[in-house]
Amino acid sequence: FDAAISACEKAGKWEKALQLLRVLAHSKVEPTTITFGAAISACEKGCQWQKALQLVGVMIQNAVKLDTISSNAAISACANYGEWDKALWLFGEMLTRGVKSNRLTFNAVISACEKGCQWEKA
């Protein structure tokens, strides 16, 4: 499933990626950090910031470990629409959960604050 969802992400087929994730949820196979990361990236590329955040919520709810890649994708999705408060929330979750941040993380958070006219928060 990871490879199929990743292929959907690369092809810009976020709806198909989420459909495969739903199929996986009904099977006996547990989605992994990589599975969710690919689906979140697909949502980011498909301009679906709300869905990306929903997937992060599902990860947290199901105790699937957040990682830098999936977190950065969700923060970038929020940044694309100036959803600075969501980006900052997710950045806080990263810090709380010990997820390493990198240059992409900081750039996405700053971009979200800039687009949301929240320069003082950046």
Image: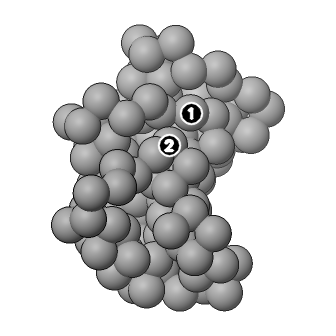
Label 2: state its secondary structure.
helix
Horizontal and vertical percent position of residue 21: 36, 68
Among numbered discs 2 and 1, the one appearing first in the sequence? 2
Q: In terms of image quadrants, where is residue 68?
A: top right
Most extreme residue toward the right is: 103
Q: Nearer the viewer, residue 71 or 117?
A: 71
Task: Give the residue type at disc 2.
Answer: Thr
Q: In terms of image quadrants, where is residue 54?
A: bottom left
Horizontal and vertical percent position of residue 37: 54, 52
Name which residue lies at 27% across and 71% down.
22
Residue 82 shows in this picture:
no
Q: What distance separates the C-alpha of mark 2 from that of mark 1?
A: 7 Å
Q: Nearer the viewer, residue 7 or 85?
A: 7
Q: Which residue is mark 2?
A: 33
Residue 14 shows in this picture:
yes
Identify the mark at residue 67; answer none if there is no mark: 1
Horizontal and vertical percent position of residue 25: 26, 62
Task: Give the residue type at disc 1.
Answer: Asp
Q: In terms of image quadrants, where is residue 88?
A: top left
**Quarter placement of the C terminus:** top right
Identify the mark at residue 32; answer none if there is no mark: none
Name which residue lies at 20% across and 66% down.
26
Q: Residues within 10 Å of mark 1 (few under 14, many from 20)?
A: some
Say if mark 2 contacts mark 1, CB within 8 Å.
yes
